[in-house]
């Protein structure tokens, strides 16, 4: 009897494994080629509402990656407010270590299409926290005001005021006001680039580096291959959302050519801090981010440009379960450390580095994790279907 039970169990396990493997293979096939298994599984889960689009959710323990220094000493989180010039205020979150002293400061602007409900300091808390852990820096993230209630230049003014606030208050958190970097992703990458421009133009606080994750760099209608190829929304950013953001944040066409909305259109990009620009293969914003990297280099700014293959817009937010996201954060931390130490090679030639999808043992690990996640998704879908 027990032998028959074992045979049945093995047979059912094989059937289930084949179903899961077939599902992953099916999810991986797109009109743009075959996706890496992990990317395909995550996109399937998000696009079919099988999991919430909230990268700050805790991953399963066996999928979580280490966050560097975090846990060895006390990580302190402070919640404060930044007083604006019009007597209003915006929230700000600060991560620092309890032993921080004259540490570099990273001013991080969250993504979210400049729109209410698309992003906040809460949805990007994992990136903010991890950058602090990996660099030992004080990381400050302001909740700048967004559209449709607040159109351009509100977000820009809030961002620049945040830079001034950091300069004025850095020492309270163990930071060095003479060592401030700006960083951000997507819309936040735009604001980081614009804040660097505005600080240069206004003789504001010195900025030692700018870290831009898949930034939006122009609101103008220009022909870009990545915009037309990956704009369906399947890769977590759609043309529909981009147009909605433009209409809400920059309702007047004359705003689209302003360097403080579209830094790619700026006539003068000289005198800006060293930049790292990270882009994703399957991202409508890929080409404009890389074009901005080229223009910065042509203006004399040291630029490190890296494209991660096999991943989509927003991939860094999924670093707990995507190896490419973790690699990008590690590269970012190394860049920021070198920039803070003023050891960036100012004379190096511009080159777009392409990081391939993880290979070797990392690929084996990614495939195994993709299978585990897919098994969960298939099981969840089956249970939901049966219990309806």
Image (cartoon, rainbow, N blue to C red):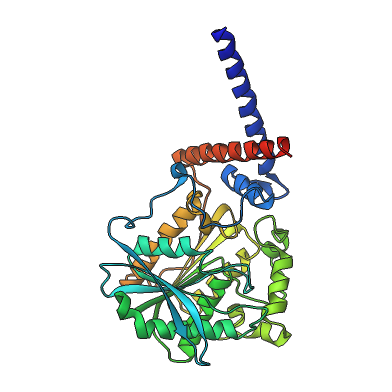
| Front-lying residue, 87 or 360 | 87
Residue 372: percent from left, percent from top: 54, 37
| Front-lying residue, 258 or 130 | 130
| Front-lying residue, 17 or 210 | 17
State the image quarter where residue 133 is shown: bottom left
Residue 84: percent from left, percent from top: 49, 88
Residue 231: percent from left, percent from top: 71, 61
Residue drawn at point x = 28 percent, y = 56 percent: 72
Whether residue 271 is visible to the viewer of this picture, yes or no, is no
State the image quarter where residue 206 is shown: bottom left
Residue drawn at point x = 57 percent, y = 79 percent: 145
Indicate whether 323 appears above or below 367: below
Residue drawn at point x = 54 percent, y = 78 percent: 144
Q: Is residue 290 left or right of residue 349?
A: right
Whether residue 227 is visible to the viewer of this picture, yes or no, is yes
Residue ranking furthest to the front: 387
| Number of callouts | 0
């Amino acid at each position: 009897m027990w032998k028959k039970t074992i045979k049945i169990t093995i047979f059912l396990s094989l059937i289930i494994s084949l179903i899961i493997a077939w599902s992953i293979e099916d999810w991986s096939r797109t009109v743009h080629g075959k996706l890496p298994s992990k990317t395909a599984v995550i996109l399937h889960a998000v696009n079919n509402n099988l999991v919430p689009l909230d990268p700050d959710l805790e991953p399963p323990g066996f999928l979580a990656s280490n966050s560097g220094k975090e846990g060895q000493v006390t990580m302190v989180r402070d919640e404060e407010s930044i007083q604006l010039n019009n007597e209003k205020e915006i929230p700000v979150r600060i991560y620092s270590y309890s032993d921080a002293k004259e540490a570099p400061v990273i001013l991080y602007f969250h993504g979210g299409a400049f729109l209410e409900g698309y992003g906040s300091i809460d949805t990007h808390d994992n990136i903010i926290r991890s950058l602090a852990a990996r660099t030992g820096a004080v990381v400050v993230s302001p909740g700048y005001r967004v559209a449709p209630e607040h159109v351009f230049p509100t977000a820009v003014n809030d961002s620049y005021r945040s830079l001034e606030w950091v300069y004025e208050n850095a020492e309270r958190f163990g930071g060095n006001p003479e060592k401030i970097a700006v960083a951000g992703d997507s819309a936040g990458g735009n604001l980081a680039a614009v804040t660097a421009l505005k600080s240069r133009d206004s003789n504001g606080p010195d900025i030692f580096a700018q870290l831009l994750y898949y930034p939006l760099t122009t609101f103008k209608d220009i022909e870009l291959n990545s915009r037309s190829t990956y704009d369906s929304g399947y890769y977590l950013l759609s043309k529909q959302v981009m147009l909605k953001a433009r209409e809400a944040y920059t309702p007047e066409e004359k705003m689209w050519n302003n360097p403080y909305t579209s830094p790619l259109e700026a006539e003068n990009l000289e005198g800006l801090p060293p930049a790292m620009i990270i882009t994703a293969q399957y991202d409508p914003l890929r080409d404009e981010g890389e074009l901005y990297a080229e223009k910065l280099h042509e203006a004399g700014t040291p630029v490190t440009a890296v494209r991660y293959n096999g991943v989509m817009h927003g991939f860094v937010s999924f670093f707990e379960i995507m190896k490419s996201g973790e690699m990008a954060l590690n590269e970012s931390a190394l860049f920021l450390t070198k920039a803070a130490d003023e050891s960036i090679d100012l004379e190096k030639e511009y080159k777009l580095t392409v990081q391939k999808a993880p290979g070797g043992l990392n690929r084996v690990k990614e495939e195994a994790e993709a299978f585990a996640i897919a098994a969960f998704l298939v099981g969840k879908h089956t249970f939901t279907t049966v219990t309806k």
